[in-house]
Image: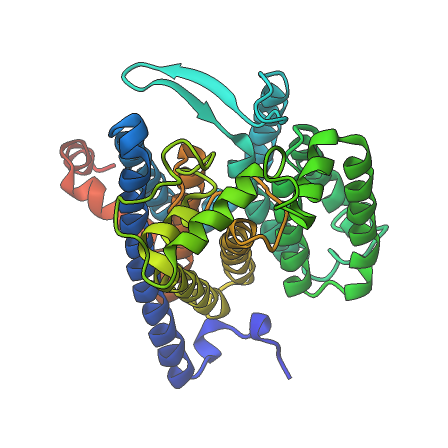
Amino acid sequence: MKSFTEIRPEEIPAELVTSRTDAVVSGVRDLLIVTGLLVAFGLTMLYSTSYGIAGIKYFRMQIIWLLLGTGSGLTVFLLGYRRIASWWPFLMGGVFLLLMVAMCSKEVNGAHRWINLTIPGLGKVGIQPSEFAKVILALTVSKYCADHLRTFHELFRLKGGLLQLGLIVVPVLGGILAGKDFGTTVLASTMVFLILLAAGLPVRYTLFPVGALTGAFFYIMSCDPMRRARILSFLDPEKYAANIGYQLWTSFLALGAGGWCGVGFMESRMKARYLPEAHTDFILAIVGEELGLIALVLVIIAYAFFCRAGLKIASNAGTRLGMLLGFGLTMYMTIQAIINISVISGCLPTKGMPAPFISYGGSNMLSCMTAVGLLLSIAQETISPDYNKRIFAYLRRKLPFGSAQNSTGE
């Protein structure tokens, strides 16, 4: 019996094609709706959270980042995920260099995550390379597994095996960890492992990496005072409420004050210089205070629908690369949302992990919107193969310079 990847398109029953197309169209519709709702809700809450402290500065900047992210998503959609995945050596090299530049930058909150730039009209902005690394790692690992389907799980194979993939991926993960961004390292590593498992990697092969990460965790906790303090405050936030547990304890107070229905939009007291990072990593704590537990549950449901839509697109993708990439990108944003919600509610130690589409942050918005563009590209490729070539051909016919070329017979 032939596997799905061995069946030629003309051999696929018409009923199956129609079913897959309907599922992908449904996934795209849900993805666009839930992304639009999350972005609109995020802008609304960002305005409420930051207006009394910084006016509309953060709100205006987030709109600019949203426009840039939309442009990035549209670009990757037009280019197509298969073409972009073929550029993985240049993308991995570029993000590794950016991580090394960030390593030489000024330390902020105990980590070297940002590259500070001065952009005309925008002033000083911080770029976080590790945010882009997550998308690029998903592209790279998915492309590698798709191209070496029968050999990628062989541990000591020099070409096309797991060892070669490790030599490609580990330097980037190491660059993120070297910048003391332990949370993003865990998130990116988890995403890589999930893609490998989806591609067919035996579970036993993950035991050593998981053990290594666990050992690294305890080593960092014992040698890094700031990380050790975060663990202590997580275990007993009330005891350390006056110092290292202040942020988590204030988040608890915000959530507790909100109750079921909240204290009212723009009526938060904790955002007034009490809760640190209220407009970024802990914005959902302000959501709980102003709009209550019901609003938080609706946000969780929205993220669940996003995950469902992404998995629907991935599971019905027309190529193995599309399936693995769609799965990896969906997992990356879903796990990031889970971590953020777990942190503000005290289920995980405090970690600088923004809520996708909601928290303030240019790099996070660019990364998330680019991921959405790639998911839409996977969906469109399933419905209409080589759609981007037809789009570019249409543009060449319609644009003035394209018409000139056609008239000369080119």
Vertical placement of residue 57 versus 397, above or below: above
Q: Position of residue 119 (x, y in %)?
A: 35, 16
Q: Quadrant of residue 153?
A: bottom right
Residue located 57% across and 31% down the image: 95
Residue located 77% across and 65% down the image: 203
Q: Report the front residue among 139 and 283.
A: 283
Quadrant where the C terminus sits is top left
Visual colour scheme? rainbow
Residue 64 visible from this viewpoint: no
Residue located 58% across and 26% down the image: 109
Q: Position of residue 294 (x, y in %)?
A: 36, 64
Q: Quadrant of residue 320?
A: bottom right
Quadrant where the N terminus sits is bottom right
Horizontal side of 42 relative to 237 (left or right) equals: left
Vertical placement of residue 129 versus 338, above or below: above
Count of picture labels: 0
Horizontal side of 207 relative to 50 (left or right) equals: right
Q: Report the front residue among 21 and 232.
A: 232
Horizontal side of 241 relative to 250 (left or right) equals: right
Residue 348 visible from this viewpoint: yes
Q: Position of residue 287 (x, y in %)?
A: 36, 51
Q: Position of residue 180 (x, y in %)?
A: 67, 31
Vertical placement of residue 71 versus 143, above or below: above
Residue located 79% across and 49% down the image: 214
Q: Report the front residue among 37 and 73.
A: 37
